[in-house]
Image: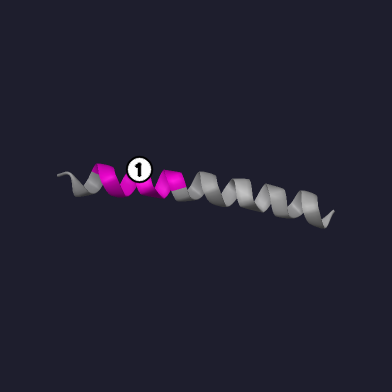
């Protein structure tokens, strides 16, 4: 039961991190 919420939290964390990195990369490239 603890695995589901934990995995979901990690997914959200990585997603946010990826979006932030992508945004920074785009800004840097542009």
Q: Residue at the far bottom: name it.
A: 29
Dominant SS type (magenta): helix
From the image, tell me which residue sits under label 1.
Answer: 9
Q: Position of residue 25 (x, y in %)?
A: 72, 55
Residue drawn where x is 44% and y is 45% of the image: 13
Q: Position of residue 9 (x, y in %)?
A: 35, 43
Tell me: 5 left or right of 20.
left
Q: What residue range appears in magenta?
A: 5-13
* Dot 1: element: helix
Q: Position of residue 10 (x, y in %)?
A: 37, 48
Scheme of colours in the image:
one colour
Residue 23 lies in the magenta-colored region: no
**Callout 1 environment at 10 Å: few (<14), some (14 to 19), or many (20+)?**
few
Residue drawn where x is 75% and y is 53% of the image: 26
All told, the count of numbered labels is 1
Tell me: 30 left or right of 21.
right
Tell me: 8 left or right of 23.
left
Residue drawn where x is 46% and y is 50% of the image: 14
Q: Residue at the far left: name it.
A: 1
Tell me: 28 left or right of 1.
right
Residue drawn where x is 27% and y is 45% of the image: 6
Q: Quadrant of the N terminus?
A: top left
Residue 7 lies in the magenta-colored region: yes
Q: Position of residue 5 (x, y in %)?
A: 26, 42
């Amino acid at each position: 039961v603890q695995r589901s919420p934990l995995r979901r939290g990690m997914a959200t964390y990585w997603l946010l991190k990826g979006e932030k990195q992508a945004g920074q990369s785009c800004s840097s490239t542009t």
